[in-house]
């Protein structure tokens, strides 16, 4: 007889299998690959498979937010600045049309070459970035625009200047702003989902995760440095806390996994964008018809239940 943990996993697998992530795609092979992936979730990924996800999530050619924006959104118009201190390039915000409907987009952007990476601070936002994100959220709430966020950061910038500008408070206020939004929201972890810098823009009605993305409270190197005083033990740390998509789904941290082309999203960016677009639209279909008050109530309940232990006695 299946144990309680296995029953919970089967329930989540059933829910994921029912999500119309691939409806309408012409890539027939991807549907079979996703079904294979669901079957494999019953067995724990090996340490090597978990580390492979870490490497693919960080791959230098992996598509970033603006790569997907270019392929998914029409008439995208970027918004700059927090209306207070500065424009943080580590976070991109803007308006665009998806399937004929206006959306607000918020996402991390790492940068490709050395110059752009320095400009965008490797996707690690200062408080100004999260204040810019909150400005976009406010715009969405006022005008009734749904919100899509794309998460891809090692974490919020931990430097002295960021702390002096109120990094912790900005992250907390960004999460609170997302919880209060009356509009439907979908977050997508498209690469690294690191710590508070990630969750600041991921408190959404539905959280999707690409097949080879990772989502965790700390980087494998940071965890290894704390536990074993050796960042070189990152593989061991990743195997221990399991930041891969399969385990995040099992834990209920994310609501669905979006398949990637064979070998990772970087091997075929157009196909990866098509799959991500279909996943986003399917997720919005589930939540579009909710009343605003019900949406906020269900959102609060969703996150309050995370990490809660229920007694069976």
Image (cartoon, rainbow, N blue to C red):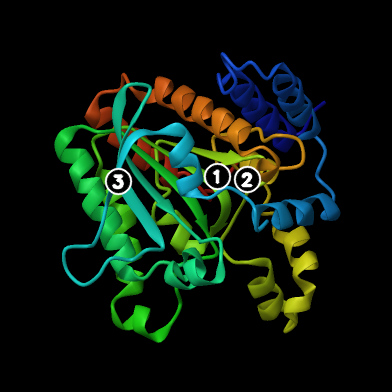
Q: CA distance from mark 3 to mark 2?
A: 28 Å
> At which x and y percent is residue 208?
53, 38
> At which x and y percent is residue 24?
56, 13
Which picture quadrant has residue 10?
top right
Asked if residue 219 shows in the view, the reply is yes
Query: In terms of secondary structure, where does tag 1 sit?
Result: loop
Residue occupied by mark 3: 94
Q: Is residue 102 left or right of residue 50?
A: left
Q: Nearer the viewer, residue 40 or 24?
A: 24
Q: CA distance from mark 3 to mark 1?
A: 26 Å
Query: In terms of secondary structure, where does tag 2 sit?
Result: helix
Camera-side mark, 3 or 1: 3
CB within 8 Å, label 2 to label 1: yes
Q: Quadrant of the C terminus?
A: top right
Q: Nearer the viewer, residue 220 or 276?
A: 276
Residue occupied by mark 1: 253
Which picture quadrant has residue 258?
top right
Q: Quadrant of the N terminus?
A: top right
Q: Is residue 313 left or right of residue 86?
A: right
Residue occupied by mark 2: 248
Which picture quadrant has residue 133?
bottom left
């Amino acid at each position: 007889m299946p144990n309680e943990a296995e029953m919970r996993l089967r329930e989540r697998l059933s829910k994921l299998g029912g999500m119309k992530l691939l409806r309408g795609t012409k890539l027939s092979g991807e549907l079979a690959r996703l079904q294979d992936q669901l079957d494999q979730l019953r067995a724990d990924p090996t340490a090597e498979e978990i580390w492979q996800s870490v490497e693919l999530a960080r791959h230098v050619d992996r598509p970033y937010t603006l790569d997907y924006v270019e392929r998914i959104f029409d008439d995208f118009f970027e918004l700059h600045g927090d209306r207070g201190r500065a424009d943080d390039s580590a976070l991109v915000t803007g308006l665009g049309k998806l399937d004929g409907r206006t959306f607000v987009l918020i996402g991390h952007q790492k940068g490709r070459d050395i110059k752009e990476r320095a400009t965008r601070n490797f996707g690690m936002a200062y408080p100004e970035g999260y204040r810019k994100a909150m400005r976009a959220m406010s715009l969405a709430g006022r005008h009734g625009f749904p919100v899509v966020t794309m998460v891809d950061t090692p974490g919020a910038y931990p430097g002295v200047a960021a702390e002096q500008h109120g990094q912790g408070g900005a992250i907390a206020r960004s999460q609170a702003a997302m919880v209060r939004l009356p509009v439907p929201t979908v977050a997508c972890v498209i690469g690294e989902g690191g710590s508070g810098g990630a969750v600041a823009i991921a408190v959404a009605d539905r959280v999707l995760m690409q097949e080879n993305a990772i989502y965790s409270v700390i980087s494998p190197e940071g965890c290894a440095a704390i536990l074993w005083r050796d960042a070189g033990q990152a593989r061991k740390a990743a195997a221990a806390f399991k930041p891969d998509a399969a385990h995040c789904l099992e834990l209920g941290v994310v609501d669905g996994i979006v398949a990637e082309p064979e070998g990772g999203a970087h091997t075929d960016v157009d196909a990866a964008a098509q799959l991500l677009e279909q996943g986003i639209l399917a997720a919005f279909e589930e939540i579009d018809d909710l009343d605003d008050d019900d949406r906020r109530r269900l959102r609060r309940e969703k996150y309050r239940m995370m990490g809660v232990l229920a007694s069976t006695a």
